[in-house]
């Protein structure tokens, strides 16, 4: 039976529409996959050396154990968004003469071979090999590796247990921040508390039984729960929660635009993928912390321009590049209803503008790292507002891939085509190029002013640009409609 | 008045629609009948400028639909579920359409009230998104949405499919009433010969993209259609 399941799996993978995507995209995905894989393996190999270097007076294993608790929590947090139990796929199997227990085992077993679990595998396997090579006892290291993999499976299955509630997510997020805060401000040394627990897995090899049994228990809980849930009206039914509607009456103030703004806000808030987009964008505010705190980057001024454009424009790129594909599932209605195309585009532009302003306001605290930073971010925000918004909307007219809004948010390539990768060049590359040129030829002030002026210029010509874009959307309309009709899995 | 002249649509070498000329006078209730692949939906999509004609064009009340958008204010339609916005509740959807057609909340509410029987308590106040409604209920919402804002041309593709018997009967009454209104042109397509003959003044039969029959509905029409499709 399982052999047949695997056969089905194989076919669903190789016949899936994402596999049949355009060659360019396929290459990018494969390239990205190889990059991720080699990054993980590389990190695994050098982790020992890195830890040795940063914490010369502590054993790498000890240091690693201290941080394991964060790793587990972070994994849980992210898996909450990324990983869903693949229950829907078994619908056609239900009416066939297959035992429910084997279907359940299949669902759960399948989740064990997910990409997320392999990530840990490819990270820790090279790490362990290095450890053994460095003379650590092979038995301890080997069983520690087993423990870690058991922990990964544990996280895997616990995720499915808690997946149903948003409260769990908040708790995990809170726990994560709380522990880190306690640690950081030196109130309670959480790492020292959890460190020995995780280190014990290495020190006492027989402890391997603990994570293994934990994983087994998590599996069993899932199994016993799921087995009774495989009915069309139970877990296989897409849940529909009672809806809270809000009037969003304040959007009225925007007149005709308000109608569309309201629709867009509802779209963003009520669909997983768009909502995730907002959260990701907000998280990227912290991107600056990685760079501003490091001398090498701060001295590279063009890097600062990149950060400015990127941080203030993250929602612009994330959301804007899929305009109008967000509306793909009802684009036919939008095109035959009494909607002037221009109004539609204008409302998208204003929504993105608001995001740029908000992102800029959020990056203001980076003034701590110098007034330059603030000035560059301000110039970048203006550039994003004036130039990048029209640019991204223009490129949107090349979108022909349907987006199913209620499909899982992350790692979702739906709606992605080569355009999405090409667009980075004008949106990110061009302003950085302009900035760098002005910076190296004249001065940093000139560079910032140039970006700002370009933005203001774009803003001044907004009406004309939008007319042009509207025309473009009109001519591409039929192709878009046909493309959006093609359903993908 | 809607006129189509030399309207053809080709996909590759396959001719899916070939209409030399068709005139639908203002106020007519017009039925389109044909087997799968006869070109019904293609014709409606051309009427709504959702696909490009290979040759010819459609003129709706003096406006050539693929060159101007001016036909949109007085034309409304429900073709399939892709006309619904899944993440809105039915009420929100109706208000949205109302906004687009210059109707405020009270206007929309008044209109919805008159469809209370048709909704059968399954659409309004359900606190559910449209995407979570059953196919039949989605259809009901879509059909009623197409009545918002007193459109002069209403295009419904297969309105009877997926509806339960009670709703089908109610819908027939609604369409008849709509068609009886001064100056409202109703275009529907259907696989159900009985329903169209009951509702439409005129029935056009499409077969492989060509008009093969153009009948003013009478007592014998159903018989005639049944012979045509049965033979």
Image (cartoon, helix red, strand yellow):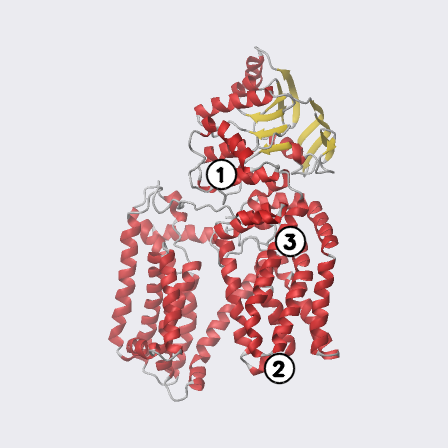
Mark 1 vs mark 3, CA separation in Å: 29 Å
Residue identified by numbered label 2: A299
Host chain of mark 2: A
Q: Are marks 2 and 1 in contact (CB under 8 Å)?
A: no
Whether residue A45 is situated above or below residue A470 in the rendered picture: below
Q: Nearer the viewer, residue B123 or B10?
A: B123
Q: Position of residue A290 (x, y in %)?
A: 52, 75
Q: Residues within 10 Å of mark 3 (few under 14, many from 20)?
A: many
Query: Can you tell which mark lies on residue A396?
Result: 3
Question: Could you say which quadrant of the image residue A187 lies in?
Answer: bottom left
Q: Residues within 10 Å of mark 2 (few under 14, many from 20)?
A: few
Image point (42%, 52%), residue name = A9
Q: Which of B112 and B28 is in front in this view?
A: B112
Image point (50%, 24%), residue name = B171
Query: Can you tell which mark lies on residue B90?
Result: 1
Q: Nearer the viewer, residue A451 or A322?
A: A451
Question: Could you say which quadrant of the image residue A212 lies in?
Answer: bottom left
Mark 2 vs mark 1, CA separation in Å: 56 Å
**Horizontal side, residue A113 vs residue A426: left or right:** left
Q: Position of residue A295 (x, y in %)?
A: 57, 83
Instruction: Check disc 1 and report its element: helix, strand or loop.
Output: helix
Instruction: Check disc 2 and report its element: helix, strand or loop.
Output: loop
Mark 2 vs mark 3, CA separation in Å: 35 Å
For marks 2 and 3, the one nearer the N-term is 2
Instruction: Check disc 3 and report its element: helix, strand or loop.
Output: helix
Same chain for marks 2 and 1?
no
Whether residue B198 is situated above or below residue A23 in the rendered picture: above
């Amino acid at each position: 039976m399982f052999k047949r399941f695997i056969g089905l799996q194989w076919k669903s993978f190789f016949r899936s529409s994402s596999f049949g995507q355009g060659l360019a995209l396929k290459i990018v995905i494969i390239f990205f996959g190889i990059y991720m894989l080699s990054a993980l393996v590389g990190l695994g190999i050098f982790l020992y050396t890195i830890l040795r270097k940063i914490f010369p007076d502590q054993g790498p294993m000890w240091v690693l154990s201290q941080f394991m608790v964060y790793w587990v929590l972070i994994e849980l947090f992210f898996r909450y968004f990324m990983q869903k139990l693949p229950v829907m796929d078994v619908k056609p199997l239900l009416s066939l003469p297959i035992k429910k227990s084997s279907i359940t085992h299949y669902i759960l077993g399948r989740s064990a071979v997910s990409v997320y679990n392999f990530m840990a595998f490819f990270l820790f396997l090279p790490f362990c090999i290095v450890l053994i090579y460095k003379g650590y006892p092979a038995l301890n290291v080997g069983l520690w590796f087993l423990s870690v993999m058991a922990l990964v499976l544990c996280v895997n299955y616990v995720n499915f247990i808690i997946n149903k509630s948003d409260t769990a997510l908040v708790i995990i997020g809170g726990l994560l921040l709380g522990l880190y805060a306690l640690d950081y401000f030196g109130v309670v040394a959480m790492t020292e508390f959890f460190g020995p627990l995780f280190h014990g897995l290495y020190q006492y090899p027989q402890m391997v039984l603990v994570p293994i049994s934990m994983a087994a228990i998590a599996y069993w809980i899932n199994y016993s729960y799921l087995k009774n849930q495989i009915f069309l009206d139970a877990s296989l039914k897409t849940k529909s929660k009672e809806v809270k509607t809000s009037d969003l009456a304040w959007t009225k103030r925007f007149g005709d635009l308000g109608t569309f703004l309201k629709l867009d806000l509802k779209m963003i808030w009520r669909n997983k993928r768009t909502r995730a987009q907002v959260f990701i964008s907000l998280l990227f505010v912290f991107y600056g912390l990685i760079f501003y705190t490091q001398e090498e980057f701060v001295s590279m001024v063009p890097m600062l321009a990149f950060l400015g454009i990127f941080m203030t424009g993250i929602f612009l790129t994330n959301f804007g590049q899929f305009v109008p594909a967000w509306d793909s599932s009802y684009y036919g209605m939008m095109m035959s209803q009494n909607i002037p195309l221009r109004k539609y585009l204008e409302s998208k532009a204003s929504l993105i503008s608001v995001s740029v302003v908000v992102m800029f306001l959020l990056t203001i605290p980076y003034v701590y790292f110098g007034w330059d930073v603030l000035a560059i971010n301000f110039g970048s925000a203006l550039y994003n507002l004036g130039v990048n918004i029209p640019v991204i909307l223009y490129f949107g007219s090349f979108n022909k891939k349907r987006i199913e809004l209620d499909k899982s948010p992350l790692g979702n390539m739906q709606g992605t085509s080569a355009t999405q990768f090409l667009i980075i060049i004008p949106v990110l590359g061009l302003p950085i190029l302009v900035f760098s040129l002005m910076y190296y030829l004249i001065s940093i002030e000139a560079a910032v002013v140039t970006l700002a002026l370009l933005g203001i210029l774009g803003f001044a010509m907004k009406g004309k640009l939008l007319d042009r874009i509207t025309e473009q959307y009109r001519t591409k309309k039929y192709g878009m409609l046909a493309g959006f009709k093609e359903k993908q899995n | 008045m809607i006129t189509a002249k030399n309207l053809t649509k080709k996909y590759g070498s396959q001719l899916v629609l070939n209409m030399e000329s068709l005139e639908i006078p203002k106020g007519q209730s017009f039925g389109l009948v044909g087997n799968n692949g006869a070109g019904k939906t293609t014709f409606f999509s051309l009427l709504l400028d959702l696909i490009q004609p290979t040759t010819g064009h459609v003129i709706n009340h003096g406006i050539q639909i693929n060159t101007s958008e001016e036909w949109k204010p007085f034309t409304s339609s429900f073709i399939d579920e892709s006309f619904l916005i899944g993440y809105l509740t039915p009420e929100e959807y109706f208000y949205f359409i109302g906004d687009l057609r210059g109707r405020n909340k009270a206007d929309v509410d008044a209109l919805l009230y008159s469809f209370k029987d048709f909704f059968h308590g399954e659409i309004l106040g359900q606190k559910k998104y449209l995407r979570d409604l059953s196919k039949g209920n989605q259809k009901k919402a879509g059909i009623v949405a197409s009545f918002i804002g007193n459109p002069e041309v209403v295009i419904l593709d297969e309105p009877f499919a997926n509806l339960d018997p009670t709703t089908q009967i109610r819908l027939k009454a609604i369409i008849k009433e709509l068609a009886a209104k001064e100056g409202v042109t109703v275009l529907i397509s259907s696989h159900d010969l009985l329903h169209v003959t009951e509702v439409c003044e005129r029935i056009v039969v499409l077969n492989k993209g060509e008009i093969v029959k153009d009948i003013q509905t009478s007592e014998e029409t159903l018989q005639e259609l049944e012979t045509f499709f049965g033979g």
